[in-house]
Image: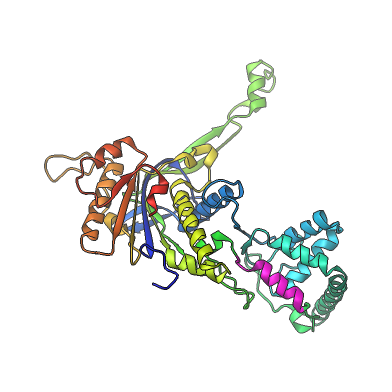
Amino acid sequence: MTSNSPAGSQFLSLHLLETLVAVLPVRDENGSPKSIVYGGAERHMITSQARRRAERVHARDRANAGVGALAGRSTGTRTREWALITGRELEEAHGWDREEAIRTARAVIEATGLKFGELSKKTVANLTKVLLFAPSDAGKRIAAHIQEEAKELRSWTEEYLAAQAAAAKKSKKGGRKPADTGTDEGDEPVEDAAADSKLPPLPSGTRAAVLTALAPRDAIDIALYGRFLAEIADSPNVDGAVQSSHAFTVHEAEQVDDFYAAADDAKLNRKKNALDFLDAADDAGAGMTGYQSLITGTFYRHAVLDRVRLRNNLRAAGMSIEEAEEASVAAEEEFVNAFVDAFPEAKRNSTASTGSLPALVLAFEGERPYNYAAAFQTPIDERPPTKDENGGDGPAGPAAVRRLLEHHAFVSARRPDIVSGRVLTYDPQIAKLLTTLGDLGATPVTTAKELTA
């Protein structure tokens, strides 16, 4: 623990059980549900990447809407479109011609160190090769600097683009391909043509302004989830304060391939009004048919917040100790809220998946992270229990709650650093079950906010 440590333990461990019915929150490259084999049984899986994005966007949208603990605070945007965003700001706020604005923004950002797509490919020409996670106002800041130095940067841009075009022409005459971005799968990467020429360097003041705009600064979600930017060595990376595990079913996976038939409204209208007697054969059958994979199950998921790392990240971004402490407390509250409420939005309209609420959330602090995935290495057997040993565990939801809390009580009795356990449920049946389990190793609470200490 460092001098920037919070008053409580360093790590906040969160564990959650949720039951999902006929959903598809995440898919593989073939459109099928993702899965893993664990404990000798195949399980459905929801990747941590899908979860983290859902939680990050949930917290960001609330902050931008003036809702929640992070209301009004700076957040980040992860995109390849920073040149387009900057160009649009130059056009709308400073009156630049659109083409010149985008051309200048692209050149400035590229000369700072980020690589773009080929100019000959319109779809990627103004997109960076990598997603860049930066404060949401980065484009506005870069545009403001370009406007301030408009005379110098207009002249520099023309010189830069002319040198770039000459390098590409020289490369083409020499029998080599122009610069390839590698953005299209299967492309063979080649050396940038620009590397063969001496491009005019970006003015040092402009490069510093772009780096400052793209730096993490006080964006709370960058401090929480981190970022990695290898393209610009002197732009700081951030080791995130949040660890997230893949969610998996506590029982063996069962997948349903649902056949669907979509109706053609115009065709049905003709049939209903007897207008198709001459072309009845053409109007036979559904408008479209197909299959979609759906999954059902009770999932366990886990995340950890490193409170010390969060405070250090915010201090490194320029906050005072007092400012970092205040922001960290707010960030912890909103992170827990997002862990409980956020959900990946794939097929949200056709499955109403985003309306799910967890059956149980367990939160506690410790001097190290604690992952309870081992509690479900033996898959839950959902057959009805019997008096002898041949029965199952019963429904997965209640059985998983019993197993998780028994595991927690067992571990916490042997690890004195585990303190301040709290449990939250949105299921009345689970609430009744908790009253029968004796010592839970945690205190029941009624709101997500109470899960933080």
The residue located at (22%, 38%) in the rendering is 384
The residue located at (80%, 67%) in the rendering is 146
Q: Is residue 121 visible?
A: no
**Where 433 sits versus 38, above or below?**
above
Instruction: Provide the residue span drawn in magenta.
Output: 204-217
Left/right of residue 181 with respect to residue 333 in the rendered view: right
Left/right of residue 142 with respect to residue 39 in the rendered view: right
Asked if residue 212 is among those painted magenta in the image, a careful observer would answer: yes
**Most foreground residue, 60 or 157:** 60
**Most foreground residue, 266 or 432:** 432
The residue located at (85%, 63%) in the rendering is 100
The image shows residue 411 at horizontal and vertical percentages of 24, 60
- Residue 94: quarter of image: bottom right
Asked if residue 405 is among those painted magenta in the image, a careful observer would answer: no
The image shows residue 83 at horizontal and vertical percentages of 74, 63
Q: Quadrant of the N terminus?
A: bottom left
Q: Is residue 186 visible?
A: yes
The image shows residue 105 at horizontal and vertical percentages of 78, 65
Left/right of residue 42 with respect to residue 47 in the rendered view: left
Q: Residue placed farthest to the front in the image? A: 322
Q: Quadrant of the C terminus?
A: bottom left
